[in-house]
Amino acid sequence: MDRTEVGALVRSAVDGDAAAWKALVEGMSPLVWSVVRAHRLSDADGHEVYQTVWFRFAQHLGRIREPDKTGAWLASTARHECLKVIKGMTRLTLTDDPQVLDRASDDRTPEQTLIDSEEAADRAERVRRLWQELDELGERCRQLLRVLVSSPPPSYVEISAALGIAVGSIGPLRQRCLRRLRARMDQRGAA
Amino acid sequence: MNKDNGFPYDGANGDGDGDESADALLEATADALLEEELRQAAAVLDPVPDFLRQLALEAYALHDLDARIAELTFDSLVDALPVRGVTDAPRMLTFRAGALTVDVEVTGEGLIGQVLPPGSARIEVLGGPGAARPVAVDSLGRFLSDDPPRGPFALRLRTGTEVIVTEWLRA
């Protein structure tokens, strides 16, 4: 979805246009989901955060001060809910060990099945490797790239809202992370 | 000598070294290609689950311009200092809409709360689009539910004169 349409879609949805709401959900869901995934929540927690964000957005629709910046609003709301989940976890476990938050990702059996059924096996293998390397790239890079590659591509303002990092630092960080990932892929290819 | 630091773009616009800017362009192109490849990988390997997308579509029903929103002004999860050794502290929440305040305490056993200033109201716990169950309220606006909210929830209050809904929150 073209981000310039977002403001108009929000205004239409406020006026009762269900198709506009659907377009917003279709266009913005991947961004909200990417923020949830970037924070490595459990499936159950992640699903609840995703729902909370959309419920609250529906509730605040019509009161959003800058409809054109709805993406940033959603990303920021998702981030804050993710941080609350993480805070709740640390309170419960009373530990400062960051490993608690850095749990292994959920198993990907259904996706694996999907890949197996794909005809372009080589390409699928590279995609799978790429995703695995991303997972092992280090937290900052993994978080940035996970949000950066949601569809359609988010703006830097949205990424900033999603991860709480300055807009100005996104470009250099993006470059560094993509190059690090590329180097790892080249290394594996050569091995 | 500072050109040989592994970051050719640092000096790319400096003294007109054509090879360096060509390299930088190649690198930037490779970055863009990799980003696009990752975007496709995300769409295939980590898509938004269908049932969640469906719930977001249905959430449009929660759009209610007639209701006033009571904003979350205190959340013990964020605003209170953790008490060491207390692992099951209740979640304390305060919502505010104008002069009206709703205090809520969420525990594993359920939910208790108080509307201020005291007064009768009809109160429901919302669990999503179409999910609402009433809670018992006394004449002073104190309410009680022995069914703890799971996942996102909001409270809908009907005083004699208006409808107020608390901000959606994850219990």
Image (cartoon, helix red, strand yellow):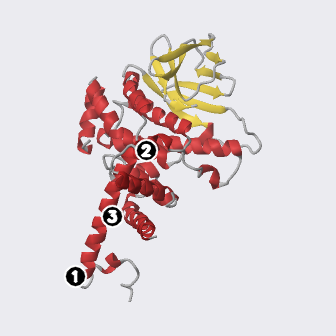
- Residue closest to the eye, B102 or A102: A102
Kindly tell me whether residue B123 is visible in this rendering.
no
Would you call the spot at circle 2 few (<14 residues within 10 Å), some (14-19), or many (20 or more)?
A: some
Q: Quadrant of residue A185?
A: bottom left
Q: CA distance from mark 3 to mark 1?
A: 20 Å
Q: Secondary structure at mark 2?
A: loop
Residue B37 pos. (x, y %):
34, 55
The answer to whether residue B167 is left or right of residue B171 is left
Q: Residue B158, can we see it? A: yes
Q: Nearer the viewer, residue A146 or A105?
A: A105
Residue at horizontal 65 percent and vertical 27 percent from the top: B105
Q: Amino acid at mark 3?
A: Asp
Residue where numbered disc 2 is placed:
B46
Mark 2 vs mark 3: which is more N-terminal? Answer: 3
What label sits on residue B31 in the rendered view? 3
Please tell me which of labels 3 and 1 falls first in the chain.
Answer: 1
At label 1, which amino acid type do we have?
Gly
**Which sits earlier in the primary sequence, circle 1 or circle 2?**
1
